[in-house]
Amino acid sequence: MHIITWMQDPARKRKKLNYPEQSQGSRLASKIRAAASKLTAEEEAEHFKKGMARIYGNHAKEISGAGH
């Protein structure tokens, strides 16, 4: 009979990483989320379209709406 040992081992505890509660990036992200939540559907779609154009290089014909 073959015994699978990894199933019998208790879950290993991961080392807790020491991250700050707030950073410049987390504060900026919070401000961006707050501003984004106030956008209308049309404004959100326009920002999405501009973001996709920036990522894919202004090839608007190739950019799908992806539901936005």
Image: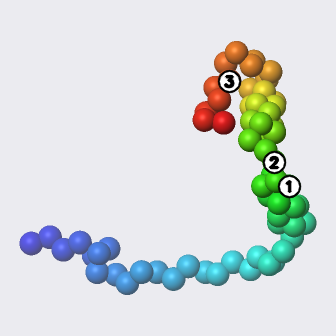
Q: Quadrant of the N terminus?
A: bottom left
- The residue type indicated by label 2 comes to Leu
Q: Which mark is residue 39?
A: 2
Using the rendered view, name the quadrant where residue 16 is placed: bottom right
Looking at the rendered structure, the secondary structure element under dot 3 is loop
Q: Is residue 51 visible?
A: no
Q: Residues within 10 Å of mark 3 (few under 14, many from 20)?
A: few
Establish if 61 lies above or below 12. above
Q: Of marks 2 and 3, which one's residue comes earlier in the chain?
A: 2
- Judging by the rendered image, the residue that carries numbered circle 3 is 63
**Which of the pair 43/32 is nearer the observer?**
43
Query: What residue is drawn where x is 37% and y is 84%?
Result: 10
- Residue 57 is situated, as x and y percent measured from the top left of the image, at 79, 23
Q: Which mark is residue 35?
A: 1
Q: Which mark is residue 7?
A: none
Q: Classify residue 14 as left or right of residue 60.
A: left
Establish if 8 lies above or below 39. below
- Residue 32 is situated, as x and y percent measured from the top left of the image, at 85, 56
Q: Are marks 2 and 1 in contact (CB under 8 Å)?
A: yes
- The residue type indicated by label 1 comes to Ala
Q: Classify residue 62 as left or right of residue 38.
A: left
Query: How many marks overall?
Result: 3
